[in-house]
Amino acid sequence: MANRPANAGSGSIGTGDVAPPFDAAAPPPPVHHDAFPRPGTPRATPHANAAPAHATPAHAAPARAARTRLTWLPYLVVLAGVAAGIAVAWQGSKRAAPGVAVVGCSLLAAALARLILPDRYAGLLASRRKALDVLAFAVLGAAVLAVVLSLP
């Protein structure tokens, strides 16, 4: 019994030396959703005159829409290059090497576009940090071009 904790009791049931597992008079512990406001209660803002965080000026909407359309452009160029390379390679075994070369060059172009373009214009080419994206595209493009050299 020397190695048992002080509140472990003697191990006999019904002797009364063990405290009950909870205090019936104490309120229950809070649950995770108690901290959130109830529906219909107004939210507190840091300043009385502060605008909501999602509010944008009226002139920013067209610029944001144009930028959103522009972010698809590098991705679509790379996708079109890969699709064209696959279409050329699909023509037969004599055209497989040029088609695979187009795919490899498209991936290298993706690496270059990701390196040059800022994050907000990289669009779907940006999925991780810039260095990791550039490295992934460059290694994959170089590997595909190495396959071209091994084709007869």
Image (cartoon, rainbow, N blue to C red):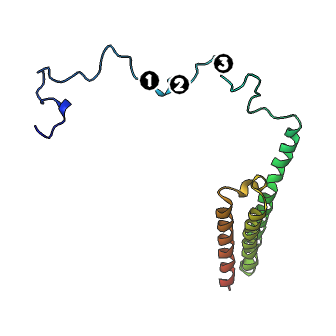
* First reached walking from the N terminus: tag 1 or tag 3: 1
Whether residues under marks 1 and 3 lie with C-beta atoms below 8 angstroms apart, the answer is: no
Q: Residue 20, position in %: x, y?
A: 23, 21
Marks 2 and 3 in Cβ contact (< 8 Å): no
Pick whichever, 83 or 22, lies toward us.
Answer: 22
User: Is 147 drawn above or below residue 85 in the view shown?
Assistant: below
Which structural element holds mark 2? Answer: helix
Q: Amino acid at mark 2?
A: Ala
Q: Residue furthest front?
A: 47
For label 1, the SS is loop
Q: Is residue 31 above or below residue 68?
A: above
Q: How many marks?
A: 3
Q: Which residue is mark 2?
A: 35
Q: In the rendered view, does 46 fall on the left or right side of 13?
A: right
Q: Which residue is mark 3?
A: 42
Q: Give the quadrant of residue 36.
A: top right
Q: Pointer 1: what residue? A: 30
Is 41 located above or below residue 101 in the figure? above
Q: Quadrant of residue 112?
A: bottom right
State yes or no: discs 1 and 2 in contact (Cβ < 8 Å): yes
Q: Quadrant of residue 117?
A: bottom right
